[in-house]
Amino acid sequence: MVIVGGYLLVFGCLLISVIYFTMLERKVMRYMQLRKGPKKVFFLGLLTPICDSIKLFFKGFVVVLFSNEIVFLFAPLLSVFFLMVMWILYPFAFFSKDFYFGVVVFLCVRRLKVYRVLGSGWGSNSKYSLLGSIRGAAQVISYELVLVFVMLVPLVFQSSFSLGSFLWEGFWYGVLVLPLWVLWVVCCVAETNRSPFDFSEGERELVSGFKTEYRSLGFAFLFLGEYGQIIFIRMISILIFFSFGLVLLNVCIGVFCALCFIWFRSTFPRFRYDLLMEWCWVYCLVFVFFFFFCFLGFVFFYK
């Protein structure tokens, strides 16, 4: 019962975090772009995201004509389901259950995210949605390979596939392998389809990408899955690369990662799609392979 209650508390806190992460994003972009942000509802606009969420949940749900209704309705639920499974894998200090192969299960669940994107695009029976889902799926598959090899370096140090081992016996691997940490942050932005790598939702080309035909609860679930995964990626980044006591410093690193996501969106123009794929397969992957095999040679030589 303690574990179930703990996870219910985590999911409630996650929902509030997603709501106020959008608030933080709008506030920071307001200052970066010298314009007015949300500030009318309550003090400093603190209730604005809650009012927006209530309005979104109570809008009428519309099923698109000639769409594949089962896939169209099931894709947003998959988004929330995968998010909940990933948060169950996260090792909390007081109530969570440690999975010995937690990293492997985490990577498998991340692979399944592709079906959520493809399902929401194909099930909508819209050219905009389908093209956005194909772009997003190709982008996720490409950059996930880079993330896996970057993650393997701390795993070799830990000699374990358990996420809980980083919680109790971690180290500042982000300082030890700083170039890989920087590459990890950039690839996380690309893998979560955030600006300037938001090709699956290019407003000027695809309206809203694979979310174009969704309203009300469907859009809310897709939105929750997207922003919830961003928060989870931040937590995993801190756990793997900076998990060594000093809770306040870890919180500061998490806030810095969140601000990086917002800073990228506010500052950089969107890449060309062919340049994005070229940067992944030609430069990032070659650099990660070179660093990883040099690192393995160093470890085995000194052993």
Image (cartoon, rainbow, N blue to C red):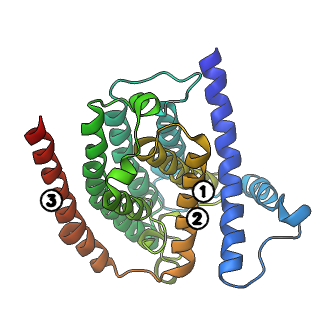
Q: How many marks?
A: 3
Give the labeled residue for mark 2: 259
The residue positioned 31% from the left and 47% from the top of the image is 151
Which class describes the residues within 10 Å of circle 2: few (<14), some (14-19), or many (20+)? some
Q: Which mark is residue 290?
A: 3
Q: Which mark is residue 219?
A: none
In which image quadrant can residue 23 be found? bottom right
Indicate the position of residue 204 as horizontal and vertical percent values. Answer: 51, 84
The residue positioned 67% from the left and 49% from the top of the image is 17
C-alpha gap between disc 3 and disc 1? 31 Å
**Whether residue 137 can be seen here:** yes
C-alpha gap between disc 2 and disc 1? 6 Å
Residue lying at the far top of the rendered structure: 1
The residue positioned 58% from the left and 21% from the top of the image is 95
Answer with mark 2 or mark 3, whichever residue precedes in sequence. Answer: 2
Tag 3's secondary structure? helix
C-alpha gap between disc 2 and disc 3? 30 Å
Of 163 and 230, which appears nearest the observer? Answer: 163
Q: Are marks 2 and 3 in contact (CB under 8 Å)?
A: no
The image shows residue 194, relative to residue 88, as above or below, that is below
Tag 2's secondary structure? helix
**Whether residue 114 can be seen here:** no
Of 70 and 82, which appears nearest the observer? Answer: 82
User: Mark 3 belongs to which amino acid?
Assistant: Phe
Q: Which mark is residue 255?
A: 1
Indicate the position of residue 254 as horizontal and vertical percent values. Answer: 56, 52
Indicate the position of residue 239 as horizontal and vertical percent values. Answer: 46, 41
